Structure formats: structure tokens, C-alpha cells
Amino acid sequence: MPDPLVLAAEVETELVEKRSRFLTRLHRVEEVEQADALLRAARSQHPDARHHCTALVLGETAERAEMNRSNDDGEPAGTAGMPMLQSLLQARLVDTFAIVIRYFGGVKLGAGGLVRAYTAGVEQAVAAATLLRRTELVVAQLEVPPAEVGIAENAVRIWAAARGATVEPTQYTARRALLTVLVAPEDFDELTADTARWSSGRHGVEDAGRRTADVPL
């Protein structure tokens, strides 16, 4: 199953359909209360808008199951919130709150037209957004004597830069330095082999568990 995606930053786009303006905002959120606060802010900023329709997708965590919800905010049932939600789900987005602020242009769009407009509004915003991939990485750790930290850090950073891995700040004790790299599971064996090569077999890499991280596409 493909990894879910999350927003790297908020985005706002505008769509005009038969003189109605559809302002779409995508926000990254972690809980329902954040979404509720963002909706209140949108209503305060756009008090003259006819509708403030919403869709929310929260990803599964250890504390909760995946949560999806939507609201048509006065539009005919099923013509706004649900199409918005389906657009988020089809884009594989999680931890995302979509608001479409509609200024009525005086021309009715009909049920089909509304579905198309709200769908297009969210799809346009998703296309404009910078996205990250949420995935599970191996926490790879390497211990070296302080005298070898410079060589180890240089080797690890060169390896990580070539593969898009993340090197965390080195941790020090009185006798050892601990280097931590977040790597894709399929790259762990290669990191182990590279470490054995530059250290002439003196050092190994330990699998210290898994961590969920958001990485560039």
C-alpha cells in the first residue's frame, strides 16, 4: 500500500465558476480542535461568504484510528463536503483540513456543478501544494571512539546525502560518540556495508528500531 502524504506548508488557491468564487485552503492539522479553530478563523476573515465547507482526514496513530469527516455548510447534501473529502483521500493526504469558502455569484450551479466545483477546488489546491511522504524509517546507530568522530561523521553524511537519509546530531558520552541515521529499510544493509568498508571492519551499524517520518517526495 502506498505511503500517505502530508502537507509541507499551508496553501490557498482560488477557482471561479459562473461568477462564484471558491477559495480553497489546505491546512496541516493533528487534531480536531485545530481544525475547528481554523474554521472559526476562516468565518471571521470571510464573514460575507455564503458557505464555508470542510473536509478533514486525520491519519491513524497509536492513540486513535483514522478519522474522516466533512460538512456541506448549507450546500445541498453531498455536493460539497463529501466531494472535498474524496479528493483528499484520492490524493492519499492525511492530517489535512480543507476549507472551501464560497462567495455566491448569483448563478446556481446545480448539484452536478457544485460537485465538480468543490472537487476541482481541492484538486487545484493539492496540485499547488508541496507534499511530503509519511513513511517508516530504520533508526540506524553507530558508535565510534571520539578520535574517529570526524571521519565517521564525514562518511555517514556523504552516504546519507546520496540517498536522502537524515543524519541526527551526534550524541557524546565520556568514551563514545553515537551517530544516528534515519534510513529506508531497503538501504540499511548498504549502510552497514559502507560502514564496514570505511572503518575496515572495526565498526558496525545497529538497528535501533523504527520511526515514522515525513520525507520529501
Image (spheres, rainbow, N blue to C red):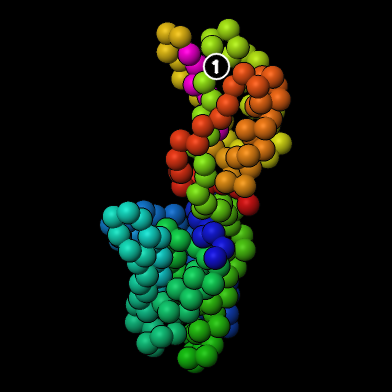
Residue at x 69% of width, y 30% of height:
194
Nearer to me, 48 or 56: 56
Q: Mark 1 belongs to which amino acid? A: Val
Q: Is residue 117 left or right of residue 71?
A: right
Residue 27, quarter of the rendered image = bottom left
Tell me: residue 152, above or below residue 101.
above
Residue 181 seen in the figure: yes
Magenta part of the protein: which range? 176-181
Residue 59, quarter of the rendered image = bottom left
Q: Is residue 196 left or right of residue 182?
A: right
Q: Position of residue 119 (x, y in %)?
A: 53, 77
Q: Position of residue 120 (x, y in %)?
A: 57, 75
Q: Position of residue 71 (x, y in %)?
A: 35, 76
Q: In the rendered view of the protein, which quadrant contains the N terminus?
A: bottom right
Q: Main secondary structure of the magenta part?
A: strand
Q: Is residue 103 left or right of residue 165?
A: left
Q: Dot 1: within a 10 Å radius of its alpha carbon, few (fewer than 14), some, or many (20 or more) residues?
A: many
Residue at x 51% of width, y 60% of height:
4
Tell me: residue 90, above or below residue 151.
below
Nearer to me, 76 or 21: 76
Tell me: residue 125, above or below residue 158.
below
Asked which secondary structure carries label 1, the reply is: strand
Nearer to me, 113 or 155: 155
Residue 43 among those drawn in magenta: no
Residue linked to disc 1: 144
Q: Is residue 200 left or right of residue 28?
A: right
Residue at x 58% of width, y 80% of height:
17
Residue 40, quarter of the rendered image = bottom left
